[in-house]
Image (cartoon, helix red, strand yellow):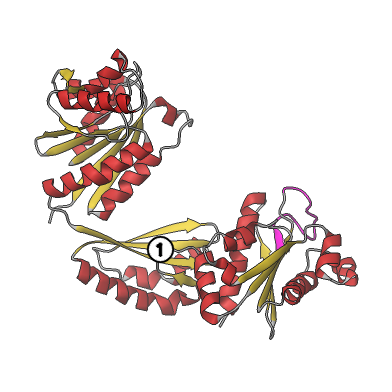
Amino acid sequence: MRLIAAEVLAIGDELLYGQTLDTNSHYISGELDKVGIKVVRRTTIGDRVGDILKAFEEAEARADIVIITGGLGPTSDDLTKPCLATYFNCEIKIHPEALQDVTEFFSRRGRELTELNRQQAALPVCCEKITNPFGTAPGMWFDRNDKIFVSMPGVPHEMRHMVTDEIIPRLLKKFRLPVIMHQVIRTVGIGESFLAERISSWESALPPHIKLAYLPGEGGVALRLTAIGDADAIRKEFDMLIRAIEPLAGEYIFGYTGDPLEVVVGRLLLERNLTLSVAESCTGGYLSHLITSIPGSSRYFEGSIIAYATEIKAKELNVMRATLESHGAVSEPTIREMATMVRKKFNTSIGVATSGVAGPGGGTPEKPVGTVWIAYADKEKVVAKKLHLSKDRLVNIKLTSTAVLNLIRQNVK
């Protein structure tokens, strides 16, 4: 079965200026992938006729389907419709059904239909109209030489309804599509190069039709396997590959779905009927935010103390002043006491803690920016770990929070 390729074109100067984030291309790519259409390129084009026409030509040469968003408004800088008329060599005329749609749209809102808005109903005569129930600009469907061009409004909610209700069903009728399947293997606590070295034999043995991508993130790396073909056969191969990678990197693998680490840890706490409390210093509440962002977290999360100042560590967490004076707030003895005391204060199964030099200032030769201590405490043990992170404050906060979640995962049995 032939792979069907698509290209997504997002039109508008506001996208190039960085004034508007192009979420449309991201959404369209995901929806096409679900039905077995491979997006081979995504391009952003400004409001210039020559650039738009050239993009049409290049996209048609590469892809079976060209999906366009933006540039369908009623003002002079909206160029997509006239450019499509030029490209397909057909005139633009008022479309009766489109005119009825836009007239009713304004009537329902008690607004007058101006001549400018009336022109929204003007379409290239060589296209099929795609109804837009949520706006005034209809979509357009062009079919020439077995190549499909689709033009949709740039307004995200209008575009999304059009994709799911109209475009995808039409494409499924037009093309015989293969199945594109992905399997994600999510790891934490290991860098990309170290992971690649660990699984090199596994990677070398991958079948040619299964492609591997490394997707590094903050604190971990996701491995994405992609294959095209028979769904049942691919699932069996993915299962075999998961079993084969676990002996090599199992200690770093925390999941095989899109669930982030905080979801996996929350599920683990629920399964073990355990409760959690948190003492945060350098993370300033971010760790608690991650934990409580998960619906149902109240079933295992009791609360937290942001003991940012040294004095608060002593007063609220009962960290011994002798410990703070002898070793400082960023130290193993302090972090062990923080985790132990927050667990006792909240009477939870587990207590965890963070303390470090997030930066960009505050570092010393002995404790430079990026020096962080984290700890895990339960009724039987206390585990502390020293991290050497970056000079970027926000990155350090996120990496520390991820490391604590991983510490919980590693120690909950």
Q: Please report the residue visible at 18 percent of the width from the left and 19 percent of the height from the top.
A: 94
Would you say 389 lies left or right of 87 here?
right
Tell me where residue 148 sits by quadrant: top left
Tell me where residue 404 sits by quadrant: bottom right
Would you say 24 lies left or right of 322 here?
left
Locate the C terminus and report the quarter of the image it occupies. Answer: bottom right
Q: Position of residue 279 (x, y in %)?
A: 72, 66
For label 1, count other residues whose C-alpha is less than 10 Å away and answer few (under 14), some (14-19) or many (20+): some
- Determine which residue is flagged by label 1: 223
Up-down: is 175 above or below 157?
Answer: below
Q: Position of residue 122 (x, y in %)?
A: 21, 20
Up-down: is 125 above or below 259?
Answer: above
SS of the residue at dot 1? Answer: strand
What amino acid is labelled 1 in the image? Answer: Leu
Prevailing secondary structure of the magenta residues: loop
Would you say 88 lies left or right of 405 here?
left
Q: Position of residue 228 (x, y in %)?
A: 22, 60
- Which residue of the protein is positioned furthest toward the bottom in this rendering? 380
The one of 268 and 105 positioned closer to us in this rendering: 105
Is residue 280 at all visible to an observer of this figure?
Answer: no
Q: Position of residue 121 (x, y in %)?
A: 23, 22
Up-down: is 116 above or below 390?
Answer: above
Examine the structure image and report whether residue 156 is included in the region drawn in magenta: no
Q: Which residues are magenta?
A: 360-374
